[in-house]
Image (spheres, helix red, strand yellow):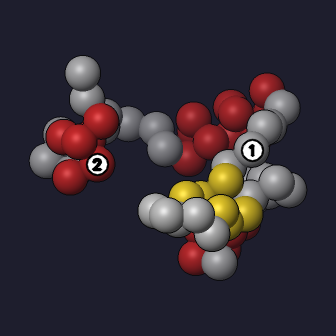
């Protein structure tokens, strides 16, 4: 619900946003059109925060 609200604050709706109840539980982001992808890019714009834990975990 927090992610849905945060996205809505930027005018972004992911209709397929949901939750998978497996182990570990995952967030289902689903597909989006190019306009939504561009809106996400703009909302997340700027340089990535290199000190963010997710950045360390997923960088190659």
- 37 lies above or below 28: above
Please tell me which of labels 2 and 1 falls first in the chain. 1
- 4 lies above or below 14: below
The reply, left or right, for residue 7 in relation to residue 43 is right
Query: How many marks do you count on the picture?
Result: 2
Confirm or deny contact between disc 2 and disc 1 (CB under 8 A). Answer: no
The reply, left or right, for residue 37 in relation to residue 16 is left
At x 68%, y 40%, the residue is 39
In the picture, the disc for residue 57 is none
Residue 6 point in image, percent of width and height: 60, 68
**In the picture, which quadrant includes the C terminus?**
top left
Q: What residue is disc 1 on?
A: 30
At x 58%, y 38%, the residue is 42
Occupied quadrant, residue 27 = bottom right
At x 58%, y 76%, the residue is 2
Whether residue 7 is visible to the viewer of this picture, yes or no, is no
Q: What residue is disc 2 on?
A: 54
**For numbered disc 2, what is the local secondary structure?**
helix
């Amino acid at each position: 619900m927090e992610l849905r609200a945060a996205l809505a604050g930027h005018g972004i709706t992911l209709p397929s946003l949901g939750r998978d109840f497996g182990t570990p539980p995952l967030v289902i982001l689903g597909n989006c059109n190019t306009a939504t992808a561009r809106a996400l890019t703009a909302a997340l714009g700027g340089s990535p925060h290199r000190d963010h834990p997710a950045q360390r975990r997923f960088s190659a």
